[in-house]
Amino acid sequence: MTTLNAELRTFYEARQQQIPAEIRQIMQRAGQKLADSGQVDSALTVGAQAPRFNLPTATGQTLALDDLLADGPVVLTFYRGAWCPYCNIALRSLQQHHEAITARGARLVAVSPQIPDESLTLTEKHGLAFEVLSDVGSGTAKQYGLAFDLPDDLSAVYDKLGFDLQRVNDGHPRTLPLPATYVIDRDGAIRWAFVTTDYTTRAEPADIIAVLDAMS
């Protein structure tokens, strides 16, 4: 079975052929600057208490981390948005492993800076059985140390590509989260963390499941 990151790498290599060289350079320069910023080292990691949140679901209800933890461990994943093809691949992969995650008593939730309408469209498109939460303004991502601002030139590229972050992020077009996944135990402690500045790589579902097995 192909791993998630092998699928992402295949997509990345095909995608690179379609992107003009000047845009590739802007993307690579922004990625290198973010990698060099040291932000990964300041993001929350294993042993920290997970910041609590109350965030709207795709259907407009509110979901609190404490309510989720009352039922067992939580797998919390941050993604950039439905406009990001790498996020779509990662979320589809998580859906394929959703049954295995819930079988281990855990709840899976995904968080992005998008408005609930965008989350609802995404949920329906991929048939997601887990909650997709809206962190408009990235307040929760900031608490986890994940929020960063796009540089001007990359923001302009995203506008040119039609991602419309001004609308989908409700007036916060520049702020995105680093891709990250946390496994949080019932006491609210982070037991496993995957954080990266590279949006083309994500936490492997098999690794998440192995962590849940070790916790049980």
Image (cartoon, rainbow, N blue to C red):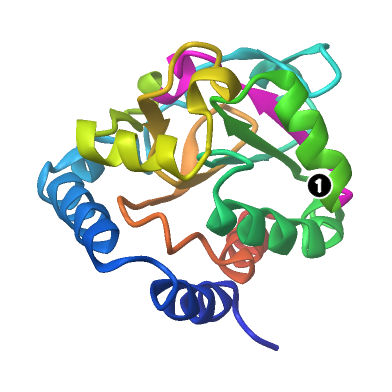
The magenta stretch spans residue 136: yes
The stretch of residues the image draws in magenta is 127-141
The quarter of the displayed image where residue 89 is located: bottom right
Q: Say if 35 sits above or below 76 in the image.
A: below
In terms of depth relative to the viewer, which is nearer, 98 or 27?
Answer: 27
Q: Which residue is mark 1?
A: 105
In terms of depth relative to the viewer, which is nearer, 205 or 5?
Answer: 5
Q: Say if 70 sits above or below 53 in the image.
A: below
Measured as percent of width and height from the top left, residue 134 is found at 64, 21
**Residue at the image position 43 percent from the left and 80 percent from the top:** 13
The quarter of the displayed image where residue 178 is located: top left
The quarter of the displayed image where residue 215 is located: bottom right
Left/right of residue 40 with respect to residue 160 in the rendered view: left
Measured as percent of width and height from the top left, residue 77 is found at 57, 42
The magenta stretch spans residue 154: no
Give SS at disc 1: loop
- The C terminus appears in which quarter of the rendering? bottom right
**Residue at the image position 88 percent from the left and 41 percent from the top:** 124
